[in-house]
Amino acid sequence: MDLGEASFLAFSACNFLRLGSYVPQIVCVARDRHGASCLSITSWSIFLLANSATAAHAAVNLGDGYLAAINGVNAGCCLAIVAVTAWKRAALNRASRLQSPPRLPRPLLRRLWPQATAA
């Protein structure tokens, strides 16, 4: 096996493992009940953009369909993580707005319910 074949094998193996590593992340975010607060949407959006740009570069400039496909799938997985995280955070925000009614400013509250603020 020459150096080119070895690097292609390493690239393929690492990307196969990387594709498998997205699944637990997506499942973890989907199950999270706290809006996936430990996950950075900014970082995953950058990963999404980087994989998309690499896929486009591979397809348009290099004519390498294999590299384009791998990075396209990686971009799709990053998009899934960003989308599920955004959905979970929006759902958490909706739920928190429903559970805690808006608070009236203190001066207005005193005028409307003076007995409530007497204590």
Image: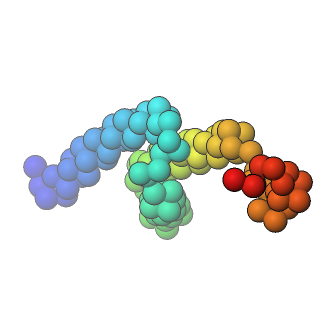
Identity of the residue drawn at 77% across and 49% down? 116
How many discs mark residues in the rendered view? 0
Q: Nearer the viewer, residue 90 or 53?
A: 90
Would residue 96 be found to the left or right of residue 54 on screen? right
Identity of the residue drawn at 43% across and 33% down? 27
Looking at this rendering, what residue extends furthest in the right direction? Answer: 112
Q: Which of 119 and 90 is in front in this view?
A: 119
Q: Which colour scheme is used?
A: rainbow
- Coordinates of residue 41 in the picture (x, y in percent): 50, 56
Vertical relation: 96 (above or below) 52: above
The quarter of the picture where residue 20 lies is: top left
Residue 101 visible in the current orientation:
yes
- Coordinates of residue 52 in the picture (x, y in percent): 51, 58
- Coordinates of residue 87 in the picture (x, y in percent): 61, 43
The quarter of the picture where residue 107 lies is: bottom right
Vertical relation: 52 (above or below) 86: below
Residue 68 visible in the current orientation:
no
- Coordinates of residue 93 in the picture (x, y in percent): 64, 46
Identity of the residue drawn at 43% across and 52% down? 39
